[in-house]
Image (cartoon, coloured by chain):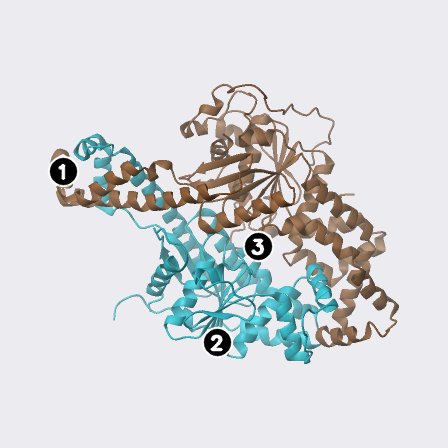
Chain colours: A cyan, B brown
């Protein structure tokens, strides 16, 4: 049939999309949700930071903990730990809580401030619950940035270590079962071909493997610049560059800035290519040391467009779909 | 008080360098007029910095806090600011980074190990203890020694919490019990929110020691960029809450009264009594440090709004970071905190937005066939190949032009105007050493 091999990323049930700030993890999360929905899946897209950026990409207004359909097949919600606690109490203790939680919520705030892990558990717990109850085919999480995601994913294990008996303990057991199953749960690390994002991604890959039970399912490289010149073209460019004045005469205007622009584009692309190479190599040796196959790397081109939001997100979804072999 | 710290510089006692900006004077030498080409120029006459520039702003402060959304070059901006201040203003300058990802170490060329693993468990590199950056690094980059000293430290959350407990615990027994409490160990080592508070606390500690003339802080990547501003106040609230007192008091006395009973029944079922016991112990022990903590948190809050402190909001001109930066700048203003500058990083060069050149690019793209033929006859190159290259040059220019214009619009839309607005052009090479840091710094400075 040709084309790239199919990568079964969207067949998972729970995807945590993370990455260094500024790499576009929210856009990638939205694009994954969009792609899955276009293929007939019923998708929950959850914004953990509650900044509303995820829903904004669908241009359908703000969403809350309950969630709302923002595109055909995509329900978006934003995480709210107090609402999550309320839901939890209602489900497991049959304590209906009307309105605010009062002293209990305040206590929770204190416990969460002093003994975090509680907040993380309520976040991860709600997401795992949606997976367990099969309310959706796929839950895509616009998760915490790479500096924080490990704490979030490791929270069930951490709490499991702390709490030996009680309801919480039995809760973390089933959460861990879902999180540890690579067929159901995965992390998608978003990066850009720049130095610091690549460093952070490699560090993240190591920490996910050593500190959590979750699998790194894919690395998405966002904003990959197109190659400007092919092999012989580069030589031809150098000749034209050396002859800028001649071109200026032919054009009847200063071609200098055009040439500088092309030079800048070439330099940017070249610096980035080096980081891409480092990323692939780093991921390869990282996984080899673990005796596993490296996570697939998916490339999303830089979108040169005025548009933000829905239009540019759809362009990115198209590119991602191609990379996944859909 | 602080055992285990070695290699600390001597305290105070040294005369501080004069750092008052030159008022009423016009351009100081040529420093302000240098273009980006001279950016690498290491040594400039020790003239007085200009007002309305980052140079002038930083020269009169003792604390500079770099904040803003993630991924915009906050850490690098902080490091470059500190390096420039140490190099040109003199004095003892410390850059304190908080980011667990160790990016500052990369930029300073200090971290060559531990990538992809537990970088923070390796020895060497940056640590909670301040380290002097060797003058040799400046000399290698610029050929001259810095006027002052550059120091760097990385926040180690766990070590900083332990130090805080040692400082405030009423006695050795309480101290040991806190340090051994399983909940405490989780708070200090494992989880992230505690970064917010401890970062500001450590800043306060370092500042009050008086060893440094300037401390530049890189703020933690918080869920919301402003979380850390509220962290000291939250900490104080936490310890002074009547609810917390009620909770721990009733647990301590084991008097199961009518008011607390249902709560414990529920809590027991959710958490299990062992965990509940750990929580209660943790709170009870922490309460013994109440007054020390609250006083401290209040002092930290005061320091943030001090006149000697300034905030740099760092951003790029992409839509999401700009929105967050703007929000952050407004939050600073509404809290009466000193917003000193907005630093816009990675800005594409202005010539990419030039309308005439864009028209020329369109002309080039549309006429690439015939232009290619004519040019190739002059150059002796292959016509098709030349036409293709011309078309690609034109396309590339038009593509980047779209992005550059989008950026310019974002910048024009910035509603908050601080004292200093610095734009830093796109840097075509990665910053891997002091030379890069100083080149970037020079671009920010004026």
Q: Position of residue A321 (x, y in %)?
A: 35, 65
In the rendering, at what x and y percent does residue A161 appear?
67, 69
**The quadrant where residue B147 appears:** top right
Q: Quadrant of residue B404?
A: top left
Q: Which residue is mark 2?
A: A136
Name above or below for residue B256 compared with residue B303: below
> Mark 3 — residue?
B118
Q: Chain of mark 3?
A: B
Residue drawn at (60%, 29%), measured in percent from left and top?
B59
Closer to the eye: label 3 or 2: 2
Q: Nearer the viewer, mark 2 or mark 1?
A: 2
Q: Is residue B208 left or right of residue A322?
A: right
Image quadrant containing the C terminus of chain A: bottom left
For the residues bearing labels 1 and 3, Cβ distance under 8 angstroms:
no
Image quadrant holding the N terminus of chain A, namely bottom left
Give the SS element for disc 3.
loop
Secondary element under disc 1, as helix, strand or loop, is helix
Q: Is residue A216 visible?
A: yes
Front residue of B217 and A311: A311
Packing grade of label 1 (10 A; few <14, some 14-19, many >=20) is many
Q: Is residue A247 above or below residue A185?
A: above
Between B404 and B334, the residue placed more toward the observer is B334
**Same-chain status of marks 1 and 3:** yes
């Amino acid at each position: 049939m040709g084309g790239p091999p199919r990568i079964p990323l969207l067949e998972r049930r729970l995807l945590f999309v993370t990455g260094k700030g500024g790499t576009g993890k929210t856009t990638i999360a939205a694009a994954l949700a969009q792609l899955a929905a276009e293929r007939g899946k019923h998708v929950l897209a959850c914004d953990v930071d509650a900044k509303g950026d995820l829903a904004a990409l669908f241009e359908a207004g703000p969403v809350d903990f309950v969630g709302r359909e923002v595109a055909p097949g995509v329900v978006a919600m934003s995480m709210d730990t107090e609402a999550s606690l309320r839901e939890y109490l209602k489900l497991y203790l049959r304590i209906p809580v009307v309105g605010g939680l009062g002293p209990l919520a305040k206590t929770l705030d204190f416990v969460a401030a002093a003994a975090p892990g509680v907040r993380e558990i309520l976040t991860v717990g709600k997401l795992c619950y949606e997976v367990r109850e099969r309310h959706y085919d796929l839950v895509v999480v616009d998760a915490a940035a790479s500096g924080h995601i490990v704490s979030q994913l490791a929270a069930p294990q951490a709490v499991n270590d702390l709490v030996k008996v009680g309801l919480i303990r039995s809760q973390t057991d089933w959460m861990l079962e879902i999180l540890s199953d690579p067929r159901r749960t995965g992390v998608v690390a978003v990066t850009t071909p720049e130095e610091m994002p690549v460093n952070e991604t490699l560090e993240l890959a190591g920490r996910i493997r050593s500190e959590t039970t979750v699998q790194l399912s894919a690395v998405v490289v966002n904003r990959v610049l197109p190659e400007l010149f092919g092999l012989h073209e580069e030589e031809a460019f150098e000749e034209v560059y050396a002859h800028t004045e001649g071109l200026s005469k032919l054009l009847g205007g200063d071609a200098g800035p055009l040439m500088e622009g092309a030079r800048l584009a070439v330099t940017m692309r070249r610096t980035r290519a080096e980081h891409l190479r480092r990323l692939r190599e780093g991921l390869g040796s990282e996984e080899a040391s673990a005796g596993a196959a490296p996570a697939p790397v998916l490339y999303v081109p830089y979108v040169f467009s005025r548009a933000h939001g829905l239009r540019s997100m759809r362009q990115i979804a198209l590119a991602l779909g191609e990379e996944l072999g859909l | 008080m602080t055992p285990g710290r070695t290699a600390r510089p001597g305290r105070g006692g040294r005369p501080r360098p004069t750092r008052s900006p030159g008022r009423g004077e016009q351009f100081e030498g040529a420093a302000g007029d240098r273009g980006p080409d001279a950016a690498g120029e290491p040594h400039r006459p020790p003239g007085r910095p200009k007002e309305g520039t980052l140079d002038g702003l930083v020269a009169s402060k003792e604390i500079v806090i770099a904040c803003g959304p993630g991924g915009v070059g906050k850490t690098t901006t902080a490091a470059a600011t500190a390096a420039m201040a140490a190099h040109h203003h003199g004095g003892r300058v410390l850059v304190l980074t908080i980011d667990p990802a160790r990016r500052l170490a990369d930029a300073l060329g200090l971290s060559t190990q531990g990538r992809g693993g537990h970088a923070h468990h390796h020895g060497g590199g940056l640590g909670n203890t301040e380290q002097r950056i060797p003058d040799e690094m400046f000399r290698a980059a610029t050929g001259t020694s810095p006027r002052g000293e550059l120091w760097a430290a990385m926040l180690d959350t766990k070590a900083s919490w332990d130090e805080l407990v040692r400082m405030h615990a009423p006695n050795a027994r309480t101290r040991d019990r806190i340090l051994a409490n399983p909940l405490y160990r989780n708070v200090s080592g494992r989880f992230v929110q505690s970064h917010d508070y401890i970062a500001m606390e450590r800043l306060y500690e370092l500042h009050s020691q008086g060893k440094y003339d300037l401390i530049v802080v890189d703020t933690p990547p918080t869920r919301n960029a402003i979380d850390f501003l509220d962290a000291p106040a939250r900490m104080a609230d936490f310890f002074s809450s009547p609810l917390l007192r009620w909770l721990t008091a009733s647990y301590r006395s084991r008097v199961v009264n009518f008011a607390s009973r249902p709560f414990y029944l529920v809590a027991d079922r959710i958490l299990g009594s062992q965990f509940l016991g750990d929580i209660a112990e943790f709170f009870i022990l922490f309460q013994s440090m109440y007054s020390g903590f609250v006083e401290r948190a209040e002092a930290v809050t005061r320091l943030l709004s001090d006149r000697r402190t300034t905030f740099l909001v760092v951003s790029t001109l992409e839509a999401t970071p700009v929105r967050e930066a703007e929000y952050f700048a407004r939050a600073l203003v509404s809290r009466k905190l000193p917003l000193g500058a907005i630093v816009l990083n990675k800005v594409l060069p202005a010539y990419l937005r030039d309308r005439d050149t864009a028209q020329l690019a369109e002309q080039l793209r549309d006429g690439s066939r015939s232009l290619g033929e004519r040019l190739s006859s002059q150059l002796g190159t292959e016509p098709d190949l030349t036409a293709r290259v011309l078309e690609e040059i034109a396309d590339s220019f038009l593509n980047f032009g779209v992005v550059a214009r989008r950026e310019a619009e974002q910048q024009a839309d910035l509603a908050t105007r601080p004292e200093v607005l610095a734009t830093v052009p796109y840097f075509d090479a990665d910053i891997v050493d002091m030379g890069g840091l100083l080149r970037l710094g020079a671009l920010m400075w004026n």
